[in-house]
């Protein structure tokens, strides 16, 4: 009898983002967030501390579904 196939997704896969706390995406101190929208949809969130960029989240959408978030 074959073993059942269970898909494994990496921790940063969009399917697992709901299991992570929002703070884990930007685990550094910040005092400002600049948001960029295109066609009314959030595209980037730039986190700053004292004017310096400490993290950037780039969001990818497929239709109305958030499909990927990349932190740089």
Image: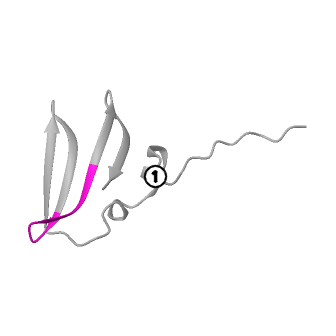
In the rendered view of the protein, which quadrant contains the C terminus? bottom left
Residue drawn 82% across and 42% down? 3
- Residue 49 falls inside the magenta stretch: yes
Q: Nearer the viewer, residue 35 or 55?
A: 55
Q: Residue furthest left?
A: 51
Residue drawn 86% across and 38% down? 2
Q: Quadrant of residue 4?
A: top right
- Helix, strand or loop: magenta stretch: strand
Q: Residue furthest right?
A: 1
Above or below for 28 versus 9: below
The image shows residue 55 at horizontal and vertical percentages of 25, 61
In the rendered view of the protein, which quadrant contains the N terminus? top right
The image shows residue 63 at horizontal and vertical percentages of 32, 26
Could you say whether the residue bearing mark 1 is in a helix, strand or loop? loop
Q: Which residues are magenta?
A: 48-57
Residue drawn 48% across and 50% down? 16
The image shows residue 33 at horizontal and vertical percentages of 15, 58
Q: Which residue is mark 1?
A: 12
- 56 sits to left or right of 39: right
Q: Quadrant of residue 68?
A: top left
- Residue 56 falls inside the magenta stretch: yes
Q: Tell me if mark 1 has few (under 14), some (14-19) or many (20+) residues whose alpha carbon lies within 10 angstroms of its own.
A: some
- 11 sits to left or right of 49: right
């Amino acid at each position: 009898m074959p073993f059942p196939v269970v898909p494994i997704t990496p921790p940063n896969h969009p399917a697992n983002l709901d299991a992570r706390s929002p703070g884990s995406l930007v685990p550094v101190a910040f005092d400002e967030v600049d948001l960029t929208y295109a066609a009314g949809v959030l595209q980037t969130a730039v986190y700053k501390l004292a004017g310096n960029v400490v993290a950037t989240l780039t969001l990818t959408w497929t239709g109305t579904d958030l499909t990927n978030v990349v932190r740089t």
